[in-house]
Image (tube, rainbow, N blue to C red):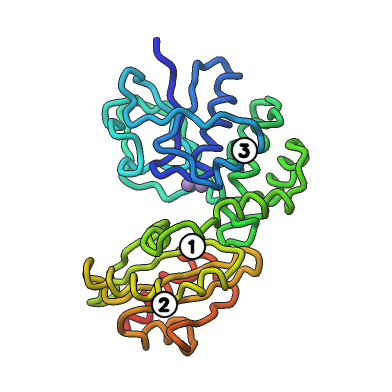
Amino acid sequence: MSKILVFGHQNPDTDAIGAAIAFAHLQKELGKDTEAVALGAPSEETQYALDHFQLEAPRVVEKAGEATDVMLVDHNEFQQSIADIADVNILAVVDHHRIANFETANPLYYRAEPVGCTSTIVLKLYKEAEIDVPKQIAGIMLSAIISDTLLFKSPTCTKEDVNAATELAALAEVDLNEYGLAMLKAGTNLSDKSAETLLDLDAKSFPMGDKNVRIAQVNTVDLKEVFDRQAELETTMALENTKKGYDLFLLIATDILASNSELLVVGEPKEAVEAAFQTTLTNNRALLKGVVSRKKQVVPQLTEAFSN
Ligand code: MN
Ligand code: MN
């Protein structure tokens, strides 16, 4: 019998890896033969967290292959999952995303809650099963909550996430804020990346009206470091617009300390951007106070502006 594979989504973030490690351990304590795996290598932020708590990065797999039974965390949509997801038996899902494109042949355990992080739900599962969370696992779960909520600054964060993180920080024996900032900073190492790489780290395209809008986001602790490269970034953004057919390219550089974002815009129509954020661009830039979430604070506002 091969092991039950437990994994998060492709291009794994700290929650996809942390929740897989934590949920696999819980299931093992409950008698299941599980192995946490990942559908990609850890990011610099995730690697920092793994190193800090002396955990091995989960084995990277592309297919379940021999393993016929799997458990999903931090995702459910088949497009975001393992390549042969349609051929395996899904025993369980623990997730905090919308449910879409999901269907199974057999009954399963499914736990979905609209909180800021899957690891917040996994902590509840430990409590319900009356299983203790080991120190290292508490550490990686804490890291996942800090990552998904940007240290509680994201509008997706709930009271439950804050309470879970506080409890996990005590178990992991770290100072929540000090460790959290250090971990987030580990994911903001932009200086050694080309403009092209930086603009592609976390970028998505959105059709808006009859325009094709590209929105990239990077986390930083030093907006100046990003905007010292403004000319180089603008040149690359303009080139991408031409090459890929974008009308408008937005870069949102998010200051994770101040919880503001500085916007850089290349392309047209800039009036729609100014209307969306009720601001005036100066030198193609604007400071967006309190904006940290593309999903909740950028895309809906822009979509609205383009529909007028
Ligand atoms: Mn995730
Ligand atoms: Mn998550």
Separation of disc 2 and disc 1 at Cα?
Answer: 17 Å
Quick one: label 2 or label 1, which is nearer the N terminus? 1
Q: Residues within 10 Å of mark 2 (few under 14, many from 20)?
A: few
Camera-nearest residue between 43 and 75: 43
Q: CA distance from mark 3 to mark 1?
A: 22 Å
SS under mark 1: strand
Q: Where is mark 2, residue-wise?
A: 231
Give the residue at x 38% y 22%. 69
In the rendered structure, find residue 218 and report the number of the disc placed on it: 1
Q: Amino acid at mark 1?
A: Val
The 10 Å Cα crowd at callout 1, few under 14, some 14 to 19, many 20 or more, is: many
Quadrant into which the N terminus falls: top left
- Mark 3: amino acid: Ile
Q: What amino acid is found at the position of numbered circle 2 in the picture?
A: Ala
Q: Quadrant of residue 212?
A: bottom left
Q: Which x, y percent locates residue 171?
A: 75, 36
- Element carrying mark 3: helix
Which dot marks residue 39?
none
Q: Nearer the viewer, mark 3 or mark 1?
A: 1
Rendered-image quadrant of the C terminus: bottom left
Q: Nearer the viewer, mark 2 or mark 3?
A: 2
Q: Is residue 25 left or right of residue 13?
A: right
